[in-house]
Image (cartoon, rainbow, N blue to C red):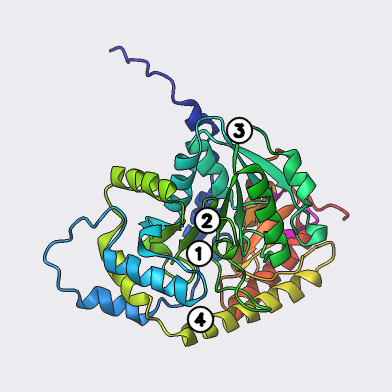
Amino acid sequence: MSTATARSLSQRASVMPASPIRKLAPYADVAKSHGVKVYHLNIGQPDVASPETFWKAIRENNLSVLEYSHSAGILALREKAAAAYTAMGIPVETNQLMVTTAGSEALSIAMSVLCDEGDEVIVPEPMYANYIGFAAANAVKVVPILTKIEDNFALPSLEEFEKRITPRTKAILVCNPGNPTGIVYSPEQLAGLREIAIKHGVYLIADEVYREFVYEGGRPQSILELEGLDELAIMVDSVSKRYSLCGARIGFLVSRNKKFMDAALRFGQARLSSPTLEMIGVLAALDTPTSYFDEVRSEYRKRRDLLVSRLRAMPGVVCPDIQGAFYATVRLPIDDSDRFCQWMLEEFRLHGATVMMAPGTGFYSTPGLGKDEVRIAYVLNVEDTAAAMDCLQLALQNYPGRTNQ
């Protein structure tokens, strides 16, 4: 019996990268099946309890049919979110905000609205790995601008950005506070980006989902607070980390550019709506008292301080200053981060446990970079973080590919 030969897959499929955060999951699954405890430092999945306000709204809803919502999101949620932004000093009107299926969809829609095939988006690297995936899915070219661990991943000069601007440049994309680096950009750095955006007429997209996770100083400045950017500023937000609601998949796309928001809504209509039940829960979660965030921030500061002190005590390890979010991009004395992270899952054990991290290579679009770096998400409690650092310290002493850094 003959078998038909299928036609080739798309070019986009061939360039879509595997997630460095999740690609080693099969090795972790095998380890767990053998009774090994795996400390997950690979993914930004907080272990902090989601707000009770969210669960109460889910439990007590009296819906008989779970219907589609408006493509821009439930009106009451949009109104409350806009009011919340305005109250914190980021004036937003309801029609300048769209509910998305997490911040991921907000970023993907933004690229779809702004870019044609082959258009360019400038992104500091290391960058959130999914930016590379979103760009590949939209046939957009990521133009990286390197930041260095020795400089705590600070933004390069304005001249370095301008060198990369071409007629096909549509936007500059930043994450503030930063994933995977933990950097928080200063008002001066944001003012520089504002200057470039206005001078060249390029959009400035800011992923601000870690706004509450800042450990020195107050809330970082939003790009929507920068003067003269009403037509150029696009803010991406999410409840995933803020409320420990990663699985709810609710985010926000915000801009004062009416043409942009009108176009974004058309993309939203193509997917019908974001999850209705989760939006009901998030509507209630927005009433979460500030004490919740104070407690969460205090807990993450403890984890950060422990992580930094332990890492800096390990020979050959370089750990930068970490100002926000809950990630650290760390340089290790290793030959290959992909090999090392897989080796940890397959071969290394300490008291029946090991550690899963994300190889640094996946956070760079420039081939060859990140081979001696890993991203660590300090999302586990202090005791588990300490145990994970015990594992990492011994693993580095025994890894066959250790280098003499």
SS for dot 2: loop
**Which label lies toward us, 3 or 2?**
2
The earlier-in-sequence mark between 2 and 1 is 1
**Which label lies toward us, 4 or 2?**
2
Task: Give coordinates of residue 94: x percent, y percent.
Answer: 36, 64
Q: Quadrant of the N terminus?
A: top left
Residue ID for mark 3:
168
Q: From this viewpoint, is residue 94 visible?
A: yes
Residue ID for mark 2:
230
Q: From this viewpoint, is residue 243 visible?
A: no
* 281 relative to 264, above or below: below
Magenta region, residue range: 330-338
How much space separates mark 2 and mark 1, taking CA atoms?
54 Å
Q: Quadrant of the C terminus?
A: bottom right
Instruction: Tell me the amino acid under the disc marked 4.
Output: Phe
Q: 334 or 243: nearer the eye?
A: 243
